[in-house]
Image: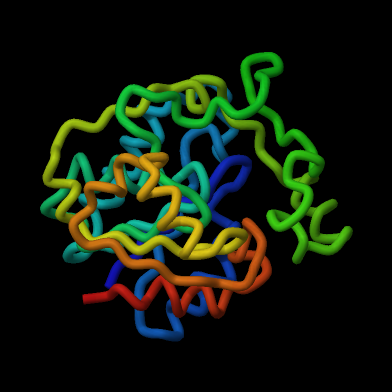
Amino acid sequence: MDILLIAGLWLDGSAWDDVASALRSLGHRPVPLTLPGQGDGSASATLDDQVATVLDAVDAASGKPVVVGHSAACSLAWMAADARPDKVSAVVLIGGFPVADGRPYADFFDLEDGVMPFPGWEPFAGPDSADLDDEAKRAFAAAAIPVPGGVATGIVRLNDERRFKVPVVVICPEFSPAQAKEWINAGDVPELAEAEHLDFADIDSGHWPMHTRPAELARLIATPMP
């Protein structure tokens, strides 16, 4: 089974190295994606460019791939299900939720010179980063790739209601499945409120389990395989 892996903000495809190795040992074909503007040196990339890269990977996959999104990239994974509802077998969302149609993709922090740099660890104090030691934090910050403004402020577009038929698994790192269900039931995540096949999985980690719990994360990703 092909598994497309899309990392969140400030990360390129190498963030998945350990998870990809574990998935291969489980008999799957992981495809970590390096998105335009997040690893190719282009600060002028747009959200549309990143969506196109994901859809190209879906179209090139063998069979119907599972599309995995981490953090902000949960929206990219969901946009793939929207654009290719008949070609995506399942969507796995790690530590995040899809943005609703018409909303900005990830305008969480101020832009500087047209990009959104990693803001440091203060916004992620607490459960998000509790399982990262000082060395891991320094390495992350040093390798962080500023997100192009055209990506961060791009507008999410969703058009095909068949996306709600695509099975979804929410992997919950710094929050619990109970919290995720509460947010969805309260209307805070309208896209998942309409999903017809929605499951949850817990992982005892911070916001970046691909770094701290890669083998366990790989097993959870592989769980929804047909």
Where is residue 111? Give x, y as percent.
Answer: 66, 19
Q: Against 193, is 176 above or below?
A: below
Where is residue 107? Give x, y as percent.
Answer: 55, 25
Where is residue 153? Give x, y as percent.
Answer: 49, 21
Q: At 74% from the left edge and 39% from the top edge, which residue is drawn?
A: 123
Q: At 34% from the left edge and 33% from the top edge, which residue is drawn?
A: 100
Picture quadrant where residue 201 is located: bottom left
Where is residue 83? Give x, y as percent.
Answer: 20, 40
Q: How is the image coloured?
A: rainbow
Q: At 21% from the left edge and 42% from the top edge, which residue is drawn?
A: 82
Q: At 18% from the left edge and 57% from the top edge, which residue is drawn?
A: 196
- Image quadrant holding the C terminus, namely bottom left
- Image quadrant holding the N terminus, namely bottom left
Which residue, as the protein is rendered here, is positioned at the far top? 113
Q: Against 213, is 27 above or below?
A: below
Q: Nearer the viewer, residue 132 or 35?
A: 132
Which residue, as the protein is rendered here, is positioned at the far right? 134
Q: Report the side of 183 relative to 84 (left or right).
A: right
Q: Report the side of 158 relative to 94 (left or right).
A: left
Q: Nearer the viewer, residue 167 or 30?
A: 167
Q: Nearer the viewer, residue 126 or 71?
A: 126
Q: Against 25, is 100 above or below?
A: above
Picture quadrant where residue 117 is located: top right
